[in-house]
Amino acid sequence: MKRVHFLFVFAQLILDAILGGVAFYAAFRLRLLTPHPGMSDSFAPYVPMLVTYVVVLVITMALNHMYRHKRVVQPLDELYVVTASVTLALLISLAIMSLVYKEEFNYQRRMLAYAWGLSILLLTGGRIFLGQIQKALQARGVGADRVLIVGTGEIGRMILQKIIQQPELGYRVVGFIDVNGKARSVMGIPVLGRVADIPQVIEKHQVDEVIIALPEADHRELVQLIAMCEREKVGVKVFPDVFQIMASEVSIGDLGGLPLLTVRDIAMRGWRLAAKRAMDIVGAIIGLILFSPLMILTAIAIKLESPGPVFYVQERMGLDARPFKMLKFRSMRVDAERDGPGWTRPGDPRVTRVGRIIRKYSIDELPQFINVLMGDMSLVGPRPERPVYVEQFRQLIPRYMDRHREKAGITGWAQVNGLRGDTSIVERTKYDLWYIENWSLWLDIKIIIRTLFRIFRDRNAY
């Protein structure tokens, strides 16, 4: 690990320990505001518990891989792991103290509840704050890793663009390796050689990390490339072909005693299906109650501006490619599709003045909470398309119909990553398939939260 990376991790560990101790002491002070007959005003009896808690907390977070170098801190992921670590650390600390001190140990449940809540709040906030400092330093080149990209094709260019657009990631591209030996530079970055030159290039340019951008390469080629890079003791990352290499759980079963590996069992069934449906029902009811005043005002505005119905009912394809009627607030003129269906584009003359506002802030999607209650849609899932487009896409895009193995959603993984409206269907399909194969309740909650934050800054909403 680079010295700078080590300092980032070490600073995080020290900050976690300090904030954990501060949270515990603050919980004690808060508990004094409501005195208890058996509670001492002195903090001295709680010092052993404080030390035990801080030590166990740091160990627990280390076991949860919280002290590995991260280039970007994701607040929701930090909150999730911090909550789990704090909960486990408090329970273990309480068990240790009870075993060591037995009857002598007197704890206050309310104080522990305060310590739990304050620890989550302070540790998450501290990690986000330190993460912002780290991003600012990385954007200025502090601790930047020198990167070599193998592959000069579309994927290699896309990776370079991402690195240029996000300097806070802490990467600096020193050059490319051209598999075919034809290119001399890519977007101003030099091509430093061919595959056989990788060891010399790594040594000469002091490369820290190699990114292999060859999704079309076969397994043998990838193994050779990785082995070549690992001999030079550099980090290796591989951009996969997401249509063929999907992250999924592998389970072992048998067929009459013959062992079989199950690598793709993504159908949502049993408790998963029940849990997702329960969250959909609760979320849809809450959404309809919270947004009902806004929906009433929107309906009035639509009626006042132009003649025609308030709602626009459109046929879309949902679970198992079955059609259903999706509800939206009408945002276009009644005769908008007299010349046939078409994608909405920026400045589209078919969109009304009210429609422009409600589309920008996704207010036109609110009636779909009714679709969720009826069971046609889910809160989170692949966005449904019209049958005419589905028929086109299924002929052009591999595995496109796999999107229909789950219910369509009001929002989805592709949408919170900026793929909304008239954007690449191929890219949206990749994100939808990743969501389906990596589904969890926590992922749904993350997508819903990110959707709420994106409403006011989505460039593709028009």
Image (cartoon, rainbow, N blue to C red):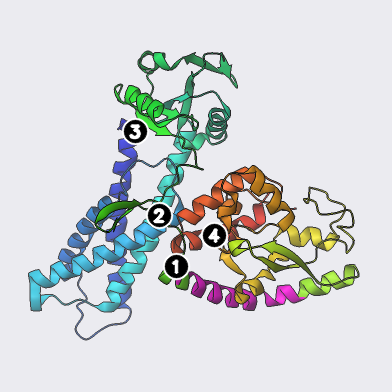
Please tell me whether residue 81 is drawn above or below residue 69 in the rendered image. below
Q: CA–CA distance between discs 2 and 4?
A: 31 Å
- Disc 2 designates what residue? 78
Q: Quadrant of residue 35?
A: bottom left
Q: Give the label, 2 or 4, closer to the camera.
A: 4
Residue at disc 1, secondary structure: loop
Which residue is identified by label 1?
A: 269
**Which amino acid type corresponds to the residue marked 3 in the rendered image?**
Val
Which residue is identified by label 4?
405
Q: Which residue is at 26% across, 53% downward? A: 258
Per the image, is 34 magenta?
no
**Outermost bottom residue:** 37
Question: Callout 1, which amino acid?
Answer: Arg
Which mark is first along the chain, 2 or 1? 2
Query: Mark 1 to mark 3: distance in Å?
Result: 47 Å
Looking at the rendering, the stretch of residues picked out in magenta corresponds to 275-296
